[in-house]
Image: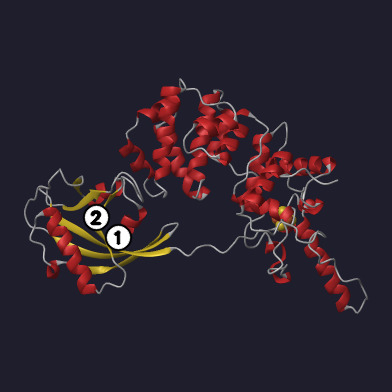
Amino acid sequence: AALPAGTAAPPPATHLFSDPAEIETLRGNLLSWYDRCKRDLPWRTLAATEPDADRRAYAVWVSEIMLQQTQVATVIDYYNRWMQKWPTLQTLAQASLEEVNELWAGLGYYSRGKRLQEAARKVVSELAGRMPRTAEDLQKLLPGVGRYTAGAIASISYGQATGVVDGNVIRVLCRLRCIGADSSSPAVIDRLWDMANALVDRSRPGDFNQALMELGATVCVPKAPLCGECPVKQHCRAQRRVEKELAFASRKLFGKPSPVPDVEDCGAGGCPLCPPATEPWDSSLGVTNFPRKAAKKQPRAARTATCVVERRGCHGALEYLIVQRPSSGLLAGLWEFPSLPLAQGLQEEKQREALADHLRAWTGWPVVAGGLRFIGEVIHIFSHIHQTYVVYSFSLDGDVTLDPALSPSRWVTAEEFHTSAVSTAMKKV
Ligand code: SF4
């Protein structure tokens, strides 16, 4: 029968989990693997042992925000320090942004710390310190909490049977069900959410979600997945396809006639979940044919002149001048050496002059281009910017007081510099 107008056709069965018995087995296989192999992580321990629901949700929330864009190994130490300093929403709400930035320094994507703190303040002031109790409310009421984070908090802390879709889950599900259409497109993402919600184990949703993500992080990895060790291999259609092709190739090698393997994608012409006709299955890639993404935009190139201004402090130790960045935009509120964005293609001499002008106008010192010493270049890749810092140094004699009406600035020793809220890029500089 024709579908009512506005209703999308259901995807072909190849791309679905439609057999309840299969779903049951998959859940069981995945969970027993997780029980045996899961990594010991501090937020997992807290989620499993903390009796208070608000504290538990807060502990999971902090971990989820830190884990966005940052590797587990890096996060562990930051997480432990954070939870030691601010074990509850209330303590975080009372912290200053400067303290948050200092603790976050080096973790990248700095606005995450700031938003986490703003949201904690909101829970304390507007929700009487009580975390929303469902994924829907978490997403609706907490700034910076998207669908994924809300699902993770609700399933792990409250046991709500709701799925999650992150990069790891996308990869695993696309492979399990041979989804080769652009995995960043809204149509595919919607299907993956449906699938995650259908698959999630009803009695252990938090563990199931973590297991699926853990599988993507440790077994079903992007480049060389360990299919031989995979607990859900029997449910994996990408793996089945590889096996079929291998069987065909070996029969051919031994001269045995055999039917050409079924290389049609799912039997439905123009299927919205299959790889596009222009990029068919590539045998040399095996299961890593999935997932596929539309080509990424190249990061934009940018150059910045930066000057390490130093002086002898009153106790004889070298001190360095740092200034605070504006409170919005890239690296908001963090401290850096005085810096100046440069136009592309500027010659060295011109760069130096521009930087000297900037320092002169800003500090009132008679800085001349020839007085700046070129040190070298430092490259740092932000998510969307390929940034080159052209580094100079400048020594100051005597004491200087900076005008506090200009951007906030201060003198720090090398040691103080490293504990200040400075970015990784500046540490490299
Ligand atoms: Fe991933 Fe391989 Fe497991 Fe399939 S069998 S889910 S491709 S690790």
Coordinates of residue 256 in the picture (x, y in percent): 93, 76
- Regarding residue 68, the answer to whether it shows in the image is yes
Q: Residue at x 65, y 40 (%)?
A: 209
Coordinates of residue 141 in the picture (x, y in percent): 50, 30
**Is residue 372 left or right of 216 when viewed as pictured?**
left
Residue at image mark 1:
429
What amino acid type should be assigned to the residue bearing mark 2?
A: Phe
Foreground of the two, 8 or 362: 8
**Spatial CA span between label 1 and label 2:** 9 Å
Residue 17, relative to residue 274: is it above or below? above
Label 2 crowd (10 A; few <14 / some 14-19 / many >=20):
many
Q: Residue at x 35, y 49 (%)?
A: 329
Task: Tally the marks.
Answer: 2
**Is residue 58 left or right of 293 when viewed as pictured?**
left
Is the N terminus in the top left, top right, bottom left or bottom right quadrant? top right
Asked if the residue at label 1 sits under 8 Å from ligand 1, the reply is no
Q: Quadrant of residue 180?
A: bottom right
- Regarding residue 229, the answer to whether it shows in the image is no
Q: Residue at x 24, y 55 (%)?
A: 337
Residue at image mark 2:
337
Residue 137, relative to residue 222: is it above or below? above
Q: Are marks 1 and 2 in contact (CB under 8 Å)?
A: yes
Q: Quadrant of residue 51?
A: top right
